[in-house]
Structure formats: C-alpha cells, structure tokens
Image (cartoon, rainbow, N blue to C red):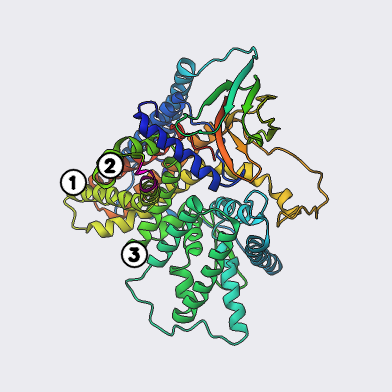
Amino acid sequence: MKQSSRSPFVPWIAGAALLLCVLYFALHGSMAKRESGDSHVTVYNLLISKPRMGEELPVYRTTQGNTITLKVTSDRPGEVYVHGYEKKVTLKPGGETELTFVAADAGMFPVHLHEADGTMVALATLEVQPK
Amino acid sequence: MRHLPRCCMRFARLLCLIPTALYAHSFGTPYTLPVPFWMYLYGCGATLVLTFAMLGYFWSEPVSCAGVRPSEAPFRAPRGTLNQRALMLLRIGAAGSLLLTMAAGLIGNPDPGQNIAMTLFWVVFLLGFAYLTALIGDLYSLINPWKMAVDGLERIGVNLSISRFQYPKWMSYWPAFTFYVGLIWLELFGGAPFVLSCTLIVYSAITVTGTYLFGKSTWLRQADVFSVFFQLIGMLAPIEYGSDEPVEVRFRAPLAGALNESPPHISLVLIVLFMLSSTVYDGIHDTTLWIGLFWRNLLWLLHPLWGTDLGKAQNSLMSYYLVYRQIGLLLFPFLYLGFYLLILFVTKSLLKSTVPVRALALAFCYSLIPIAFAYNFTHYFSFFVTQGSHLIRLISDPFGFGWNILGEPQRSGQMRLQMGVVWHTQVGMLLLGHVAAVYLAHVTALRTFTTRRDVIVGQIPLLLLMVVYTMLGLWILSLPLGSIGG
C-alpha cells in the first residue's frame, strides 16, 4: 500500500470508517441492553443435599452493583466458595448459612462446595452482567 | 440444555460433577461473559464492510500485477545490534524460568493456582511471550533454553552439530505438529503442575536425543514446537534478528516476515491451521452447544453401542464423552485444512490456473497467521491479565509452601478487566487480524497470479474463507458457556 499517493486510498479508508461508525452506533443504540441504575438486593436459596445428580445447575443472573445474598441449607459440612470474588462461608450442617456481598465486578463466577476431603462440587454459576 | 430428555439431563449433570474435581483451583477458570448479540452482529457487519472496502481499493489500485513485491520497496530500515550483556541476561532468565517451572512442578504445591509452574509456563511463556513476539519479533530463536542446554552439552564435548542420521524428508514439520497437538491436549485436558514438569523433562530428553541424531540446527528448526510456534508469530512483527553474533536487529514493515517466506512443506500449513483450530476448539468445547451435541444428538447415533438402559451405560457413556471431547481437538485442524484446500481448489478452477493446489496452499498459508493470532489473543488475553496479576504473589512463593520472599503484603482478589473493555478488544482484535490477513492474501495473489483479473478474482474465494473464519471466531465468542464451572 506504499503507492497510496497515487491511488484513492483515503476515500476508501474514510468511507469504511464512516460505515463502521454508523453500524456501531445504530446497533448499539437499538440493541444494547439498558439497565436501570437502581441497585437491588437479590436473595438466592441454595440447598445442598445428598443425591445431587439429576439437578440442573442453577445460573444466578444479576447486574453489576447489586447485592447478593446466598442462603445455603446444607446437610453436610464444608465451605461454599464463590470463585473470582473469593468469598466463602463455612457451612453449618443441618442449618442455614448466609453469604452476602456486592457484585462489584461483571463476569461469570462459579459457586463451589469445597468439602473437607478436598472435593469440589459445582453448585451454581453467578452471572453478573455489566451495568 | 433445556431440551435434553430427562435421562440425558442426568448424565449432563453427572458430567458437571466430574471435571470439577479434576479442574484447577482458580486457574484457567474463564470469567468473561459471551460477547452480547449486538456486538456479534456488529463484528460480522464490520468484517463485511472492511472486506469489501479492501477489495474495492485493490480493484481501483493503479498497480501493475506480476512480480510486485511491496515489502521490498526502497525502505531504509534502521538497524542495530543487540547488546551482548542484555542477551546473556535474557538467556539466563529463559533457562532459569524453565528450570524453575520443572522444579516447582516436581516438588511444589499440587494446587495449580499456588504453584508458579502453571502460570510461568501457560500464561507468561505461551501467552505473554507470544504476544510480545508479535511486537518485537522472534526473540525466542535467540534465547531458546533448550538450545542453550544443547550448546552447554557441546561445550562439555558432545558434538550435537553434526547429523548422525539424515533427517528424513517426509518427517519435515510433523514432529513439531505432533508436539503441538500434545501441548494443547495437555492445556485442555492435562492439569496438575507435576504432569507439566514431567512432560517438560520428557520433552527435554526428546530434544537432546533429536539433536544428537539429526543435528541441532535441523531439529530445532523443524521439530521443536516452541521454535516453530514463535517463528510463525514473529513473522507479524516489525523487527527481525540476524542469526550470527553479535545479533543484528533490523526493523521492517509489519507483516513483512509473512510475505517474504512461505512454508516449505504441507505439515507447516497444518501447524498454522492448528493454531487457528485449537483456539476455536478451546473456545467451543465448553459451550452448551458442544456439550449438547453429544448428549442430545450423538447419544442416539451411538445407541447400538450402549444398548437401551442409560443407567447401566453411564460409565461407558462417560468414557465415550471423554473421547468425544479429545477427538474434536485432533479433528478440527483437518477440517480446517479440508476447507482451506477446497477454497484453493475453487480458486484454481475459477482461474483455470496451472498452479497446483498444493503450491497455492503453501503460498497463501502465512496470510492466515494474523487470524490465528487474533483468535488466540481474543480468546486468552483476559485470562492472561487475570492470571498474570498473580505473578508477583507466585514469585514471592513459587512452590506454594507459604513463603513470602518479596515481603509483599498479602492481597486478595485479582485484576479483572471491565467487560466492555474485554468485548471491544475481542471484536477489534479479530477485525484487525482479518484486515491484516486480507492484505497478506492480496499481496500473495499479486505475486502468484499474472493478470489483473486473476489477482482480483483469485483472491475472492480466499477472502470468503477469511470472512468465514473471522465470523466463526466472533460467533464462538458469543456462545454461552456450558454449566461446567471450572
């Protein structure tokens, strides 16, 4: 493209750039999701009991900035761990345990059960959409 | 997953339980959300706009065709020599890192997140150094730690410069391809730092044996996967290095490296296509689409193999599933190769050209490197940033024994990029790779075909291929991930 001085290089670049901008703003304006600025507190109930097979892994969808409370009822000891946020809570077997935090970062974060013997079991996925 | 029959759902769940126990603890867990639909549409639209704009420009470009070599335009590039001491330090750093990786894997903490081996090898070396190579050129050829080990052995009297056996012509780059497949297999399905260390030790033994048999220059050029990988990526860089010491550093036009050479053998074409397809496969194999394909569709095709009772067949089905996951990795590069050859066959038929498809495949191969690099970057850069931010902590405690060498205050959490930044970089980088690839294909067409019509018509099928590859890259970025939490 060294021969740009003699060829219509600039009009092609300018035309393409203009089209790209129009396309970007048109799609962004018409299709991007708008979230309200208010933040909410969302509570998710999580039950950990013996036969976990056959259950669908829940996906907790929320928006950045919301406060999340996980209410975990478990029949076994261990820790519930939210990866990425590095939040954890030690379970009380037979009782209810709460873990509350602000979903400050957007992304996908696995929620795991870490048992005392080192086993990790996927419990849910936390999906935080950006504001 | 919603449409899965109930019994399949159960297996899908079982599936979710298994990898979790094997998977790395806070290592390699993707946190990025799929690109939103409007951005996916924008990426596809922009790919078309850019492709047509470039094609239109090429059409209107007043240049003669045959034998044009833009990269050889009179361009007085600045040059210099690499400081000997700096080179020495880099070599010591490279060799030290390799030894540290091996040692940490062998004796350190088995938790991949706590052991420096995994971050040093997969993140710093294979991602970070690859991105650096695209900017500053193939520095790896100068600091290759295995080459240093071989040179060291020569210094103590083992002659590794001569070839004791003639390197078979048919072998060409096949050893490097095989090691590359093994490497990506280890990345996707391997795991523990210990396994990584053992692999590196075995690989070192193979390298020394290979250099002993066939001579170091041949082996390191054609069989050493890292040399081949970084050499391919270094072609995009605006800097090149001489091979003699003191090392000469020459500046050149970006992408010029990919224009001045073409692969000598089809196995190297396959390596470039594996660069593309392995990233695609890494992107696709954890999506609901790919997991569902097995449990929803393939399961019924395999019916005669497992009988009627799903409950009884669960163990064998799990092993089929593992085979399914792994076979895809090996299958993808050949699919990509098939598609690539088909497109070139169409080109040849369109032009009624006498150039064989094989020669076309070799000539146009390097024009795909920018797309392969863009795929890799879009797929891994957020992971590179996140996991790279653990490096200081890991240097402070390389083996995961609880040391604190640097006296760093304990920090929790990790660096994460804003999702908007991630998405825009992903789409932008794919588009940039696409533009670079289209440009390279055009210049190659100028050199390969003789008439102006042939140049333009001849590159249209290839442009189509690139549009498909780029859109496929965008599509995979937009796919929702499966419920396997890492």
List x then y, in percent, for residue B222. 43, 68
**Magenta stretch, residue numbers:** B312-318
Q: Secondary structure at mark 3?
A: loop
Residue A82, image quadrant = top right
Which of the image's four quarters has the C terminus of chain B?
top right
Which residue is depicted at the point 40% across and 57% down?
A: B271
Please determine if labels 3 and 2 lie on a single subunit.
Answer: yes
Kindly identify which numbered label has been placed on residue B460.
2
> CA gap, disc 1 to disc 3?
25 Å
Please determine if labels 1 and 3 lie on a single subunit.
Answer: yes
- Among the two numbered marks 3 and 2 on one chain, the one whose residue lies closer to the N terminus: 3
List x then y, in percent, for residue B312. 35, 43
Q: Is residue B133 above or below residue B289?
A: below
- Among the two numbered marks 1 and 3 on one chain, the one whose residue lies closer to the N terminus: 3
Is residue B297 visible to the viewer in this orientation of the structure? yes
Q: Chain of mark 3?
A: B
Q: Which residue is mark 3?
A: B265
Which amino acid type is shown beneath numbered disc 2? Ile
Is residue A2 visible to the viewer in this orientation of the structure? no
Kindly identify which numbered label has been placed on residue B484.
none
Q: Is residue B329 above or below residue B50?
A: below
Kindly identify which numbered label has been placed on residue B350.
1
